[in-house]
Amino acid sequence: MSAATGTAREGLLASYEYLDSTVDTITELREKGFEEITAFAPFPEHHIEHALGYHHSPVRLFTLVGGLTGAAAGFAFTVFTSMDWPLVTGGKPIVAIPAYVIPAFEMTILFGALATVIGVLYNMRIPDLKGDVVYDPDFSSGKFGIYVTAPPEQMGTVRSILETHEPTQIQTDPKGRSHG
């Protein structure tokens, strides 16, 4: 049973020799309405990312929020410290913003970097509390792979789409282990 949909799922894993076959298969699967697709490649490939519908990394939002939070925290910390221990030096005001820019900048960098690490780990789903999806070690040494999860009544359509693009191998996963 899939937790998201509450229905039984099955999976198919297809291995491909060529990038074009992999991209064409993913494109056709997405056109037919299949969304639970995991692609495997021996190296990062932007054509596969585009076919899967990935356009911009969601990690950059984590970095932005972390950086803005760090800047606000940096200014808040220095202003709070100055107000708690007011010390007038050289006739300057107690809250002198130009002097607080450096600590705020440093906090922006620190919080932005930490938020980026958290965003990367979150989007990579680390730690992986679920079981691994089906995997073929050849995906690390030159082959491309596509793993598709769908209800049992749609597996015939999935198999025919996968076979249209001449895979070197197709494996069945009756458990339909989801990728996310």
Image (cartoon, grey):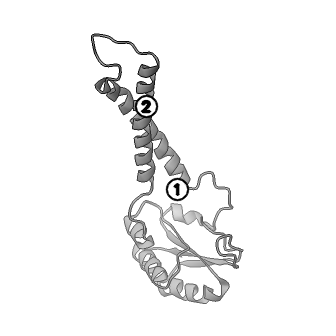
Crowding near the residue tagged with mark 2, few <14, some 14–19, many ≥20 C-alpha atoms within 10 Å:
some
Dot 1: within a 10 Å radius of its alpha carbon, few (fewer than 14), some, or many (20 or more) residues?
Answer: few
Q: CA distance from mark 2 to mark 1?
A: 30 Å
Residue 5 picture location, percent across and down:
65, 75
- Is any part of residue 172 visible from this angle? no
- Residue type indicated by callout 1: Asn
How many dots with numbers?
2
Q: Is residue 155 toward the left or the right of residue 19 in the image?
A: right
Q: Which residue is mark 2?
A: 76
Q: Compare residues 92 and 143 and report the one nearer the observer.
A: 92
Q: Is residue 135 visible?
A: yes
Residue 22 drawn at (x, y percent) = 45, 75
- The residue that appears at 68% across and 70% down in the rendered structure is 3
Give the numbered dot on residue 123.
1
Residue depicted at 43% across the width and 31% down the height: 76
Q: In the image, what residue occupies the spot 48% across and 40% down?
A: 114
Quadrant of the drawing holding the C terminus: bottom right
The answer to which of 27 and 114 lies nearer the viewer is: 114
Indicate which disc, 2 or 1, sits on the residue closer to the N terminus.
2
Q: Is residue 21 left or right of residue 122?
A: left
Q: Residue extending furthest top?
A: 90
- Where 101 sits versus 48, above or below? above
Q: Three-letter amino acid code at disc 2?
A: Ala
